[in-house]
Image (spheres, grey):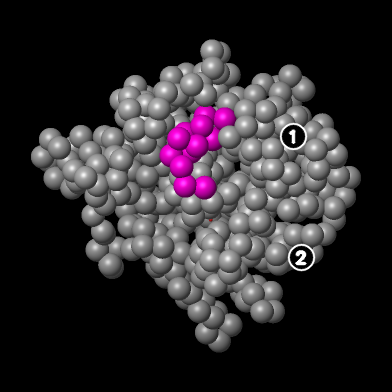
Amino acid sequence: MTRPFLDFPRDFVFGVATAAYQIEGAHDEGGRTPSIWDTFSHTPGKTWKGHTGDVACDHYHRYPKDIALMKELGIRAYRLSIAWPRMVPERGVKNQQGIDFYKHLLTALHEAEITPAVTLYHWDLPQWLDDLGGWLNRDVTEHFAEYAELVHRELGDLIPRVITHNEPWCSSFLGYALGVHAPGHTDWREAFTAAHHILLSHGRAVQAYRAAGGSGEVGITLNFTWIDPASTQPEDVAAAERVAGFSNRWFIQPVFSGTYPTDVAALVESRFGAMDFVKAGDLDVISTPVDFLGVNYYTRNVVAHQPNGDWLQVRHVAPPKEAQTEMGWEIHPESLYRLLHWIERNYTKGTPLYITENGAAFDDAVEDGAVHDVRRIDYVADHLAAAQRFIAEGGRLKGYYLWSLLDNYEWAFGYSKRFGIVHVDYETQARTVKDSARWYSGQIAHQHAAPTAE
Ligand code: IFM
């Protein structure tokens, strides 16, 4: 509670974020069929202690209470995702129970005066689509556009802000090359193919949404890692540029400039073969104008040139222990400030930005009914200060969604990493409000009470 609150423009959005597979549970209820994450997490050896999202935070059943808790904390904006296999459990089948679940959830949010932002794809591809080849099959882009249209038709009135995809970098590279996310493949050529199809599906969904008369804002969320060279030696600087190209430019450049970065493309083609999965006209679709860009930022990486290293010929330099979160990620708010300027200067120009995720995992414990997560308060306050500086210098940043409302299923790490501002006891499903939630609640109250910066 020691950190002072910050002044932000009056219309700045302060929210929290979650995703369906990480919190909902009820994996086989309400007509939902498995997603690739059900298959992956049920495969022995794929996740920490074999943890799955079968129950997670049981939000499917407890959402009224979770919404009441948000209201109590004064939270007025909430980013959630829709589980595609709840909406379309089989090819060509729309599931009324799934539609009704989200209708009730979104209605309850509006009644609580909490504005939803909805992600269409936060990694839970229906298994029936993976059986058709998943993101390697170009036809999946058509299915995604149809799904976007279905969400618009059934729920559009309740959704003022739509995010097509969350972090295509993760869905493609972690899922198809590094094998640590569903569907668990380990092939770089596949990963670049999947990345392209995901981006194409984004463009097609934006077009489908607009053609269906969607009047809300539509955009995409990309994850960014700021990359610094380990030294000023030209080979380290070049190594950092390669990693930044692969981590950041590969996704933002096609969306905003309609091209892939030629330096990275040359590397990809020399190592993994011609990018013949890119067809004429694809980049025009991918660069269909959006209303905003969602920015997920957690950390930076420091890299050095390493001949005979991985395909990018780099080595990562570990951050000092005391500057790491429980994920081993370096805490580096200054890089958020640099990143926002870089994005705006080179790509988004005037298009609004939202920080759609930022937060930290720490090893929190409940003591006498409280969680004193001082390090998380510092993390959030320092990143908000970086965001504030960017805005003060004219940057068009419109909001901040803290990851996450609840401790939840951290993918391959299972329930071992706690990102929530609300603690979850997975045995009893008891929620305990952490000190960070109280601090954030105070920040939101400050925003709405005080005469703030315009
Ligand atoms: O939990 C994830 C989330 O699903 C996507 N962005 C990063 C978070 C923390 O790893």
Between 330 and 32, the one nearer to me in the picture? 32
In the image, which is nearer the foreground, mark 2 or mark 1? 1
> Taking 304 as reference, is 369 left or right?
right
Between 37 and 339, the one nearer to me in the picture? 37
Name the residue tied to disc 1: 147
Q: Position of residue 104 (x, y in %)?
A: 83, 51
Q: Is residue 132 magenta?
A: no
Residue drawn at 75 percent across, 29 percent down: 146
Residue drawn at 83 percent across, 35 percent down: 92
Callout 1 amino acid: Tyr
Circle 2 crowding by C-alpha within 10 Å: few under 14, some 14–19, many from 20:
few
Q: Position of residue 199 (x, y in %)?
A: 55, 30
Q: Is residue 387 visible?
A: yes
Mark 2, secondary structure of its residue: helix
Q: Is residue 362 above or below residue 289?
A: below
> Taking 419 as reference, is 378 left or right?
left
